Image (cartoon, rainbow, N blue to C red):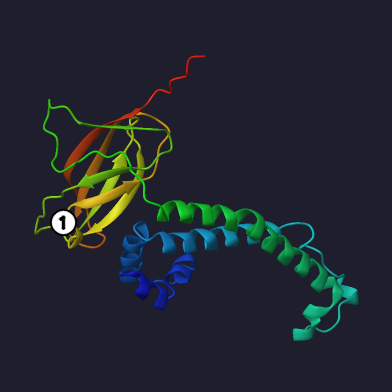
Amino acid sequence: MDHSEASRLMASEKYLLDELPPDALEAFEEHLFGCPECALDVRAGSLFLEQGKIALASPAAAGRVPAEVREPSGWFAWWRPAFAIPAMAVLLLVIGYQNLVTYPALKGASAENRSPSILPAASLVSAVTRGSNPSTIAGRPGESFLLPLDIPPQKVFQSYVVELHNPAGGVDWSLPVSAEAIKNTLPIRAPGVDKAGRYELVVLGLTAPGGKLSEVGRYPFELQFATAVNPQP
């Protein structure tokens, strides 16, 4: 799925509403990882829904008219002050939050994604054999890094999943990968982490949708954080 198709299908909106069919969902999630515009749309929509729920749960939005004085319901009943004033307050609260907090932050993130930069990287073109030294990445806490990865294709697998295992043995994230995508080196952009140490990319193969995952390979690397040097007076 490319960006034009995602826009035509309104994939971001349907993704947030859980209305994408399984095949389109998998294709959009794969596209989402490498498309800053769609990622921005999903993040903005998610924040809008989250703030809307918080605002609607506030006391101002919970105002009600006693049952004994209510007028017959209907479309124009929403314009009565008892309903219109709390509703407008909630709407203004959500819009104000979006304009003052959410959108400036997202625009800054989008501008950063569009600017060229040099990211620390470790080439994981082949699984490290036991006893050999893993690749090393020198970065900073919270800084993204690149993990170029080669996965040897195997006809038995229809698709793959790449997981990042942290030094404690937990899984930080997982990424679905199609069999078509592994024909070339995968330039995986990993989100920044706060802890240095030995990490592993674990590749799992899937023989059929909903089937059992089988381990294909492990790609360890060492993440190191540079120590800041204070200038001498």
Question: Which residue sits furthest left?
Answer: 155
x 86%, y 70%: residue: 65
Residue 222 shown left or right of residue 110 in the figure: left
Residue located 48% across and 64% down the image: 41
Which sits in the foreground, 88 or 189? 189
Task: Please name whichever residue, 31 or 36, is drawn nearer the observer in this view of the structure.
Answer: 36
- Asked whether the viewer can see residue 195, the reply is yes
Which quadrant is home to the N terminus? Answer: bottom left
Q: Is residue 52 left or right of residue 204?
A: right
Q: Residue at x 76, y 63 (%)?
A: 61
Instruction: Report which residue position mark 1 lands on.
Output: 184
Label 1, residues with CA under 10 Å away: few <14, some 14-19, many ≥20: few
Between 233 and 8, the one nearer to me in the picture: 233
Residue placed farthest to the front in the image? 233
Residue 39: x and y in percent read 43, 60
Q: Which residue is drawn at the image coordinates 57% and 57% (left, top)?
A: 47
Q: Is residue 74 visible?
A: no
Q: Position of residue 143 (x, y in %)?
A: 40, 39
Dot 1 amino acid type: Asn
Single out the residue that lies furthest toward the right: 69
Q: Check disc 1 and report its element: helix, strand or loop.
A: loop
Residue, far top: 233
Residue 77 point in image, percent of width and height: 80, 81
Q: Picture coordinates of residue 78 (x, y %)?
A: 78, 78
Q: Quadrant of residue 164?
A: top left
Q: Seen in the image, is 10 located left or right of residue 59?
A: left
- Tell how many labels: 1
